[in-house]
Amino acid sequence: MKIVVKVGTSTLAHPTGRLDIRRVEALVKVLADLKNGGHALVLVSSGAIGMGVGRLNLPGRPADMPTKQAAAAVGQCELMYTYDKLFGQYGHTVAQLLLTAEDVSFPRRRENFVNAMERLLELGALPVVNENDAVATDEVGVATTIGENDTLSAIVAQCVGADLLILLSDIDGLYTADPRRDAHAALIPEVREITPELKALAGDPGSVLGTGGMATKLKAAEIAMACGCDMVIANGRRPEQLYDIAEGRHTGTRFLGRRGEA
C-alpha cells in the first residue's frame, strides 16, 4: 500500500519540547520495517516549532510570530537530522519537502509537488513533509497558510493517491466524549460518514505544544474519505500499532474511504 503517516508534536517530544528519543526511535524502526515489507511511505511530521522551543531553551511556545518562525527554522533542522540518522541505520533515504498552502492550491505548483513526490517514491526514498512554518504564517494570510498538519497530511494523501492515512496523536481515537474528562467515554472503532453529530464530538486542541484537535482530524477524514482513502486515528505512544493498522486490524478509529466515488 501507499501509506501516509502523520506524527504529532505530542508523540515526538516531551512536554519540555525536547525530543522523546525512545519513542522516535521506536517509531522509525516500525516505519522502516513497514517499508521493508513493500509499503510506500510518506511521513508528515509536526514538531519543528516545539523542538525549536527546546533547542533554543525558550520558556514555552512563543506568542510572537518572528520567534515562532525562528523556532520552526531551528527545530526543522533537528527533526531532519534525527530522521536522516535513524532511517539511515535501516538503509532508508529520507527527503525533506516544506510546503505552503500555495504549493498545493495553485495547479502548476501542485503538479510540481505531485511529480516530485511520485519520483521520490519511485526511487525508494521516504519523503518527510511539513508546512514551511518559517515563512508560511497566519500573519501573511489564510490563503498562504494550511495551519496544522492533520489537514496537510490529508492533502498529501490526496495528492499521492494514498490507500491509507494514519494520524498518530496523544489519544487512542475518536470517542463518544472526551475520555480525559468523562470516564464513560467509549471509543468509536469505525466511521463510514462524517455527520453533524460526529463533528459535535470534536473538542479543543489538546496539547500545549501542538495545535491540532479532534476537529482538525475530522476535517482531514473528510478530505481522505472523499478521495477513497481510509484514515485511522491512533495513539502515537504505541508505534507498534502501525503493524495492525496496515494489516487492517481494528486499532483506534478507522474512517472508511468512499472508494469508487472519488
Image (spheres, rainbow, N blue to C red):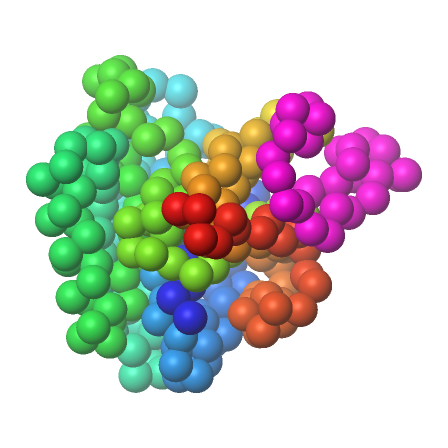
Residue 6 falls left or right of residue 143: right
Q: Position of residue 127 (x, y in %)?
A: 27, 61
Question: Where is 140 relative to 187, above or below?
Answer: above
Residue lying furthest right: 184
Q: Foreground residue, 92 or 194?
A: 194
Q: Is residue 192 magenta?
A: yes
Residue 188 falls left or right of residue 79: right
Residue 13 falls left or right of residue 236: left
Question: Does the rendering let one see residue 125?
Answer: yes
Q: Foreground residue, 260 or 148?
A: 260
Q: Is residue 73 magenta?
A: no
Residue at left 65%, top 24%?
196
Q: Position of residue 73 (x, y in %)?
A: 24, 41
Q: Position of residue 126 (x, y in %)?
A: 29, 67
Residue at left 22%, top 32%?
105
Q: Quadrant of the N terminus?
A: bottom left
Instruction: Please tell me how many numbered marks the rendered image carries.
Output: 0
Question: Where is 49 relative to 122, above or below?
Answer: above
Q: Quadrant of residue 177?
A: top right
Magenta highlight: main SS: loop
Residue lying furthest front: 260
Q: Position of residue 249 (x, y in %)?
A: 67, 69
Over which residues does the magenta segment extend?
174-200
Residue 162 falls left or right of residue 208: left
Question: Does the rendering let one see residue 86?
Answer: no
Q: Quadrant of residue 201?
A: top right
Residue at left 20%, top 62%?
118
Residue at left 37%, top 29%?
147
